[in-house]
Image (tube, grey):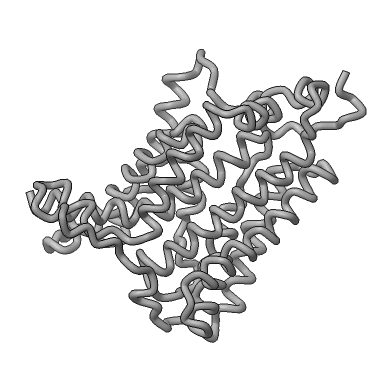
Amino acid sequence: MDVFVQIIVAAISSGTPLLFATLGGILIERSGIIQLGAEGLMLMGAVIACMTYLHTGNLALTLLAACAISAVLGVVHAFMCVTLRANQIVSGLALTLFGTGLSAYIGKSITGQPVAGAVPKVNLNWLEDVPIIGGIFAHLDVLTWFSFILVIVLHLYIHRTSWGLHLRAIGDNPPTADVMGIRVQTFRYGYIIIGSMLIGLAGADLLMVYSPTWIEGMTAGRGWIAVALIIFARWNPIRALFCAYFFGALDTIGFRIQLIGSEIPSYFLKMIPYIVTILVLMFLGWRNRNKPSGSPESLGTPYIREQRF
């Protein structure tokens, strides 16, 4: 039972960065804009978070800096996709390449410097005596609890508020939303920026909680897994929670197999989450081949106001 609890706790720790990135991607893609820049945004969020914390030692400023740099890159992505109506896939890939290269360059001076203990834990001592639940939830960190709250807030926002209805409208049918008085371009700018900030926060969480040392390319493809998780979750925040922790568990299981002295090469064990990602995508594609995908109907299609009729 103790091993089970340890695996769950490790899965939550590994899956929380994926959860933040997936939630950010859901917001962006719900507005009708494809987000393929998660890897670059996470890396930029991580390196800026590391630099800020090493220089200031202030957690609030660190998280703010990570969100700020991601917001700036989000503005660039929004300008390319919304204003210039550029190809959204190309813009996202360019964002990933730019973030990967720039983070490697500016992070050279801080490589290997630890930032352990930067994020405080919420100690719920009264939960410790509760079997299983106490072992899982009694000592989680602040960012993990924030991710739980964020999932609930975003789910209610998207499905239970008029603003969420506007978000779904501009993602499914922007001409109709425009006719109804919703400022499609303004909303898309806003959601791209907010979603990018959440993805940058994912990078900060990865650095400060899961792997508290900056290393070039430390996301190791997690941004791309987050892109896949958006599809697995069918653009739903609640499903995103379980999908993120499922893939966090896969990452943890590979590490556990190494600890028990398995002769399987570590490189193959590290491939587990990515292989499962490909297999799940193939399975979902086959299973839902004759069904609606659940994606926003205008995802990836530039909206040209002059051609709305």
**Hey, which residue is sitting farthest front in the picture?**
126
Where does residue 143 sit, x and y in percent of width and height?
40, 58
In the rendered view, would you say 244 is above or below 181?
below
Is 290 left or right of 251, judged from the image as shown? right
Q: Quadrant of residue 270?
A: bottom left
Is 183 left or right of 272, judged from the image as shown? right
Where does residue 156 sit, x and y in percent of width and height?
49, 32
**What residue sits 74% from the left and 31% below the top?**
301
Where does residue 8 sit, x and y in percent of width and height?
22, 49
**What residue sits 53% from the left and 23% below the top?**
293
Please tell me which residue lies in front, 169 or 41. 169
In the rendered view, would you say 187 is above or below 263?
above
Where does residue 275 sit, x and y in percent of width and height?
37, 44
In the rendered view, would you say 129 is above or below 43?
above
**What residue sits 67% from the left and 57% below the top?**
95
Is 7 left or right of 241, judged from the image as shown? left
Q: Across the whole image, how many numbered discs are drawn on residues?
A: 0
**What residue sits 28% from the left and 51% below the top?**
11
**Hey, which residue is sitting farthest top in the picture?**
290
**Hey, which residue is sitting farthest right in the picture?**
306
Is 54 left or right of 169, judged from the image as shown? left
In the rendered view, would you say 109 is above or below 97?
below
Q: Quadrant of residue 305?
A: top right
Q: Quadrant of the C terminus?
A: top right
